[in-house]
Structures are given as structure tokens and as C-alpha cells.
Image: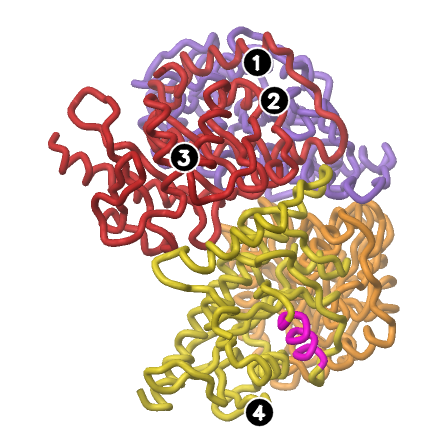
Chain colours: A orange, B yellow, C red, D purple
Amino acid sequence: MSIEDQIQQTRAVVAALHAELPRWELVVWTAGNVSQRVVVGSAPGPTDLFVIKPSGVTYDELTAESMVVCDLDGNLVDGTRAPSSDTAAHAYVYRHMPSVGGVVHTHSTYATAWAARGEPVPCVLTMMADEFGGDVPIGPFALIGDDSIGRGIVETLQGSRSPAVLMRNHGPFTIGRDAKAAVKAAVMVEEVARTVHIARQLGDTIPIAQADIDSLYARYQNVYGQQPTHTPESDS
Amino acid sequence: MSIEDQIQQTRAVVAALHAELPRWELVVWTAGNVSQRVVVGSAPGPTDLFVIKPSGVTYDELTAESMVVCDLDGNLVDGTRAPSSDTAAHAYVYRHMPSVGGVVHTHSTYATAWAARGEPVPCVLTMMADEFGGDVPIGPFALIGDDSIGRGIVETLQGSRSPAVLMRNHGPFTIGRDAKAAVKAAVMVEEVARTVHIARQLGDTIPIAQADIDSLYARYQNVYGQQPTHTPESDS
Amino acid sequence: MSIEDQIQQTRAVVAALHAELPRWELVVWTAGNVSQRVVVGSAPGPTDLFVIKPSGVTYDELTAESMVVCDLDGNLVDGTRAPSSDTAAHAYVYRHMPSVGGVVHTHSTYATAWAARGEPVPCVLTMMADEFGGDVPIGPFALIGDDSIGRGIVETLQGSRSPAVLMRNHGPFTIGRDAKAAVKAAVMVEEVARTVHIARQLGDTIPIAQADIDSLYARYQNVYGQQPTHTPESDS
Amino acid sequence: MSIEDQIQQTRAVVAALHAELPRWELVVWTAGNVSQRVVVGSAPGPTDLFVIKPSGVTYDELTAESMVVCDLDGNLVDGTRAPSSDTAAHAYVYRHMPSVGGVVHTHSTYATAWAARGEPVPCVLTMMADEFGGDVPIGPFALIGDDSIGRGIVETLQGSRSPAVLMRNHGPFTIGRDAKAAVKAAVMVEEVARTVHIARQLGDTIPIAQADIDSLYARYQNVYGQQPTHTPESDS
């Protein structure tokens, strides 16, 4: 497939995946964005481009054509609109994590609430062990406008099994082998943030032993589903 | 009706009932599964097959054809996809509870929150007395991969009026005379888990006397509705 | 309009209003019911019949034809299905409150949560003063099967401006000049129960002075809207 | 564009924006209203008319034709229905804040819950710093029927960066350069009220330094989006 065809296909995928964010109630108004690295040729591998949502455009207006193409420094390469204000953070992740093919950012309510307290979500659900392999970690407070957010994401996730980081006072960023896997992680991080929040409202939760977490994570990452769909670490 | 026709009809019923899980907001992404025992002939009765959802397939993709058929040891008998990773638990229930014709598993939020604390939902609502005949019990912590989950479900529900068990740190499993009754129990267990959670957030709830619970349960199981729709115990 | 035409029109109104209950997320599965008194002739006035939902039928299946007609003792007069199991309570209200033309029962979550604690919802919102004229009261615990529920509703609401009562450990019943007004009260009681619950979770709410409640209630009942739509007391 | 065309266009805009209120779950039944100042000619500027929702009409019935036109004293100028009961408050805002082109009022649940406690929403989220530039303030308790509500809104917002005020025991009013900006503020104030509420349920939130709030606010108001969409203060 040519680079032009691959870009066009990636635009369509990224536009379609944005519809998952309001569908799962992860965003309001124009908040939130999805990006995917452009992969050239039949063999998957990193390139120096990614597709992302334009800034300040509502979800009803999103089309493949309105998506914008950026290089890994976050510069606009193709498109008629300004890229998302979070583009620098996405670009930093792609530059520093070669195995990552998709990035998602939302302000989903429960995940953001943990972020406002600066408190990791403890791993007390078997589905957290499956998907996150432990707690969902907190990243640093960072202002928008330079590499602070991207650096905070990468430094937090490189030492973690989790495909999600809760940036302090801000909200979740998630990664995956492609944008669909990152969207799935965005859906799941809100679900576990919400469930553990509710559990904790009426008392203490029961911890899961580390050996059981390890066992659940290993099994899920290797055998679940018809084929691997979310294995950001095993790609490394 | 021939066994082939009966399998085909059961595939259609199970596929259609999966749509109830996202409709009632019991699942996100591909989580959750519904199964139903295959009943042959005009007289209902147990057989050695059941129909269940394939693993890791999204709700938008579910069709009668994509459903898979398993024997009561959980082995794939018919279908082109791998069965749900929870198949062994469903199979164990069908092997050990002959009156059960349907099983549902979700991670519905409020029920799972009680499970994360390992705390039964107390029977403080008339609709709980009607549907569950008492508290909703907690089952043991169990790893996936052998009979532990199935055994935990059966041991908990055999001594209970409740068609729902909250597996610790995991989530609810429900049973019924058929898959529709098990889906109804899955909807109702989330509803009562949510309502009692909210009631308890602002103070103590008022207990219902055991004699009143017994009276409500007896009446509801016998006279409610146009015909019996959910009477897992009376089948025994 | 003939009595037959009036019954047919009331069946259509009651069937259509049932769709409001899931729309506003007041019910799950088959829970909840709406009824309306049959009014004969051009001058509104009480008759001895009302239309109500059949028992145990899902909201997808509700049509004007499936609605049933009962007399004020709750006996089935016309229809092919068994009336709702709450019919006796509706009938009792119509027998004892001539100004009431519609009754609604749900198990809506937040209203039921207050009922599980047996705690009235305090009037701390201007919209509560408008619609309820004060606190939403708690009715007694009552078993289904005789006049206990109906009597509890009537005894609680006859001394109150509120069109809603929260029956202890059970859920809300609401009344109105017609079924639409009772449905509106069912929507509003859940909304205020939810809002005040959330307010109270983080601390004390600020009371509204009784004189201000009286002023808001008097104004709203007299001048709001294009014409009176919910004035159960002023009909008396 | 003629004044008649401008009025007609404003009616269409205001009618369409009302659909955003139930879409974002900010209102139930007929509660909530949107208005927009009528702007004449190609150069934007204040006029002495605005378009608002009629009173007591459900969202399903709202059309451009049913919208009503009022002068800045709140008197009906054009339309067949009575204007919203909140018209006097909208009119007061337009009279006293020339840069405001749109006003929205809802009883959205979480914002109203903070209002029932009389407690400002603290600025602990980067998106609050972006959109509100600090805490969301509380306005005074005010009865409907004279200028009390409008005066409370204006006095609170004139000293604030926030486009939203939570009127005590009542609910949020929001302003913007046009009705769409005010609707966005209504959506965002509920979102931040909800997220901060949830964060606070399990412990203390981490404050954001005032200098960081200032930095985020300045950047967002100046560079976000394809063009300025919500800058009520910079218009002044």
C-alpha cells in the first residue's frame, strides 16, 4: 500500500474511532482526541507520521477529511485545520515509545477524579489485573505548551504494565499497539476507575495477591480473544 | 424439533439476548457473556450442549452464526471461533445444576463494587425480596483456568434463593430457567446493588423482617406476571 | 365522546406514557406502571373505571390494545391480560382521592434509596418548592396483596402538598390530575431525590425558609406554563 | 440582513440549541432555557431584543416558530406563547452586560448540588482553569418574580472570569458571546461540578497553583480551537 493510501486509511480509522469516545461517555463537547501512527507497507513498523483530530471541532463534524497529519515533532504536514492542542504530547509518545501505534486522551470523569486527588487506582478487580496488570499510575502535574505532558506520560508508562496513566489534575492518556487498542484502554480505565471508586465509597476493598495479579495478567495478554488486540508491552 | 433446529434457535436467542447487556449498561467493550442450554424436543429437559458467545468479539459483531456450541465439559462442538474465556464456568454450572437453563456473566459496576469489598447486598428493598428472596451472596475469590469459578458459583447458589452470586473481586454470575431469566437476574442484581449502595451512602437502611421477605418472595415467584418467567428454585 | 371512545383514548394515552418511564430511566425490565382514570363527556369528572398496564409485560411490547381496564375495586373489566400487580394500590387511590386522575409507580433509584432509609427528601431546592411545596414524605412499610399500600399512599398524601410519596423500603408513588401530571411528578421526584442526595454527600445543605417555599409554591402552581399542567391540590 | 431575517435566524439557532440540553443530560421535562441576543447587520453588536424559549413547553415540541421574542425589559414582542418564567433574569443580564450575547439556565444535577450547599466548585482540574479561570462562584439566594435573580447573576459574574454562576439552592446560569458559547459553558460547568464532586468523595483534591491557573486560562482563551468560541471577558 502506498504512503498516500496508508495515510488515507489511517485518517478513516482515526475519524471512526473518535465516535467511540462519546459512545462510551468519555468526553463532552470537543474534549478528547485519538491518534494513530501511519504504518507503511504490509509489515507493521514505525514511521515518522501520525494522524490526529483537529482542534476545537465537535464530534458531529469529524470526518476522515477533517483529520490532520503531523510529523513526530508535532508539525502539521497535511490538513486544513490546526491540529489538536494535545498534539505535542502525542508526538512525544510516538518519538520515545516505538512500539506504541495509538494514543488517546480524554477527561473521562472517574479517571479524572482519581487524577485530581493524585491517587493511583488500586488493582482490586480481576479485570484490572487482566487489562492493567496492577494499579493505574499517576503522572506528574504538567502545563501544556512544551514537552512536559509527553515526558510525564512516557516516564510513567515505561516502568509500568499499565497502558493508562492519569496525569495529575488533568486526566487519562492511554496507549496501544494501534488506536483501537488505545481506545479500548481509555474505555477500560474509566470503567475500573468508576467501579473501584464506588467500591471504596462504602468501605475498604479486598486486595488481590500479587501472584494472582501476575497470573491473571499473563494469561489475559497471551490467550484472550480471537487474536492479540491489546499487548503494548509484548510488542516492545 | 430436530437437534439441528434446536441448536439454531438457541444460537439466535443467545445472540439476541447479548444486546440486552449493553442496553441495560451492564457491560463495556467485549466484557460479559450469555449462554443457554440446548433443549431437545417439546418437553423441556437438560441436554449435553449449550450455546455461548465467542471470545473477544464486540457486541456490534454478534450474530447467531458467530455463536459457538460447547459440550458440558466446555469443549467446542460447533462454531468457527474460540468460545468465551468464561466457558468453563458456564459448563460447570450446567453440569452440576440440572434445573439451570441459562447463565449470564457481567462486570456490571455496582454489583462488582460490592464484590470488590466482599460484602453481600443486604435485602432492604421489596423488589429484592421479590426477586432474590434475601441478600445477594458473595462467592469466593477464584482464578480463571480451571473449575474454581464454576465451583464457587454452584456452592454459593445451591444454598440460596438468589439467582445471582457476586464472585469476590470479580463480578456477578446469574442463573435462570433459560437465558432470558438469567439476563433478567443480571439486570435486577445491578439495579438492587446500585439502589442499596446509594441508600447506604447517606446512612443506615431499614431492614425488612424475615417473615415479610418470605411472604414477598413466595407471592412473587408464584403469581407475578402473565406466566412464570423466573423461578430457578421451583424447577429443582 | 362515548364511554367506548373514551376508554380507547385513555388506553392510547396510558400506553404512550409508559414510554416516558424508561426514557427518563425510572424503570428497568418490566417494573413500574402508569394508570389513568376514564373521564366521560366533555366536562372532566370521576368515573368508576381506570386503565392500567398489564402485569409482567416488557416496555417494548406495550400497546394501547394490551392495556387493561379495571373498576375502582381493581377488578378486570376489559382486556386479555392480568392487570399489574399494583392495581389494588392504584384503585384505592382513585376510590379515596376524587381529584386524582392519574397514578404512577416506579422503583426509580434515588427516590427508592431515600425510601430504604425511611428518610424524607428535604426541600432545599427551588424546584422542589415549585413542584412539591416542601419535603417529599415517606409512607409506611406495607405488604402487597391487600389495601395496605393504597391506604399508606392516601394517608400520606392527603396531608401534604407533595404529589409524591416514597413508600418505605419500596419506592415512589405519584399522583396528578391526569396520568401525564403523575408521570411528570415521577420524573421530578427522582430528579430532586438524586440532586439532594448528591448535595448531601459532601456536607450539609442550606435550608430554604418556609415563607420562601410557600411563595415559590404558590407562584408555580398558579402562573407557570401555558396552562395548568400539574395542580393536584387545586382540583380538590 | 434585515431585522426580520435576523430574528428568524436567531429563533432557529435558539430552538436548535435547546436540543443540546437533554442531549448532555442537563435538563428533565421542561426545565432549562436558552436565549440569544438579536444582532443586526454584519457587524456584531448589542440590540434591544432577544429570543427565548416559551414557558412550560417540552423539548419535543420546540421549533423555531414556537420561540418568543422579548425586549430587554422582558416584555413579549413577538410570539404566540408566554415567554419562559426565567425571562426577567435573562433580560437583566442582557441589559447590564453588553458583551453577553447568550444566556443559559439549567438545573443540571451536580452543579445544582453544589448550589444547594452554597459551596463554590474549587479549581482543581486543568480543564477548569482553561474554561473558568478559577472556581465556579456561588450567587445569592433569590426569589423569582423581580430582578433579584438577574442582579445576583450580574453581580457575581462581573467580578469573575467564570462564565457560570451557581445560584444558591437553585442552579446554574451561564453566559457567552452567543447562545452556543453559553450552552458550552452549561455543559462544562456540569462536567467539572460532577468530576470535582466525585474526586472529593474519597478525599482531598490537590490544588493547582494560581500562577498555573492563570497560565492555562490565558493560553486557552487565546489559542484554543480554530477560532475564538468562548471569550465572554475579552469582549468587554
Neighbour tally class for label 2: few under 14, some 14-19, many 20 plus, Cα within 10 Å: many
Amino acid type at circle 2 is Cys
Residue at which label 3 appears: C183
| Residue C213, numbered circle | 1
Residue at which label 2 appears: C123
Magenta stretch: give its range.
B148-158
Identify the residue shown where x is 60% and y is 46%.
Answer: A28
Q: In this view, does D209 lie above or below C53?
A: above
Task: Check if mark 2 and mark 1 are on a common chain.
Answer: yes
Of mark 1 and mark 3, the one earlier in the sequence is 3
Of mark 2 and mark 1, the one earlier in the sequence is 2
Identify the residue shown where x is 37% and y is 80%.
Answer: B9
Q: Where is residue C62 in the image (x, y as percent from the top left)?
A: 31, 51
Is C105 placed left or right of C169 in the picture?
Answer: left
- Classify residue D151 by image quadrant: top right
Magenta span main SS: helix
Neighbour tally class for label 3: few under 14, some 14-19, many 20 plus, Cα within 10 Å: many
Amino acid type at circle 3 is Val
Q: Are marks 1 and 3 in contact (CB under 8 Å)?
A: no
Q: Where is residue C15 in the image (x, y as percent from the top left)?
A: 30, 44
For the N terminus of chain B, the quadrant is bottom left
Chain name for mark 3? C
Task: Check if mark 1 and mark 3 are on a common chain.
Answer: yes
| Residue B75, numbered circle | 4
Neighbour tally class for label 1: few under 14, some 14-19, many 20 plus, Cα within 10 Å: many
